[in-house]
Amino acid sequence: VYNSAPNWGVAVGDAVGVAEPVLSQHLHQHQGQTFSFLSLRVPSPLSLVVNGKRPPGHALAPPRLALTNPSAPP
């Protein structure tokens, strides 16, 4: 679940409904080995239904601003 707060999650046994899932197949090769797996992307915890309820607002990670100055000396 993308954009979820670090202290939020679902527990084993929870019933989870995913409103707009995006299923992707991944196939990667690295150092002679092949890795294949499926992923289910959920853009936000607020798009889920957990045990029949929407997660609270604090389940969403707070926004974070990162700035860089490419012309600054290293």
Image: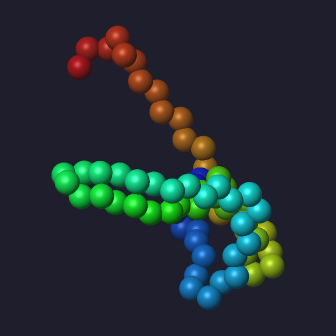
Vertical order, 34 against 65 (above or below): below
Q: Position of residue 60 (x, y in %)?
A: 65, 57
Would residue 70 be found to the left or right of residue 52 on screen? Answer: left
Q: Position of residue 12 (x, y in %)?
A: 57, 85
Q: Nearer the viewer, residue 63 or 49?
A: 49
Q: Can residue 57 be seen by looking at this rendering?
A: no
**Quick one: quadrant of the N terminus?**
bottom right
Vertical order, 17 against 38 (above or below): below
Vertical order, 43 against 72 (above or below): below
Q: Residue at x 61, y 50 (%)?
A: 62
Q: How many labels, in total?
A: 0
Q: Residue at x 58, y 61 (%)?
A: 40
Q: Position of residue 30 (x, y in %)?
A: 25, 51
Q: Residue at x 80, y 79 (%)?
A: 52
Q: Residue at x 72, y 66 (%)?
A: 18
Q: Name the quadrant containing residue 42.
A: bottom right
Q: Position of residue 65 (x, y in %)?
A: 53, 35
Q: Nearer the viewer, residue 4 or 67?
A: 4
Q: As drawn, which residue projects farthest toward the top?
A: 71
Q: As drawn, which residue projects farthest toward the left?
A: 31
**Quick one: quadrant of the C terminus?**
top left
Q: Can residue 29 be seen by looking at this rendering?
A: yes
Would residue 53 be found to the left or right of residue 59 on screen? Answer: right
Q: As drawn, which residue projects farthest toward the bottom?
A: 13
Colour setting? rainbow
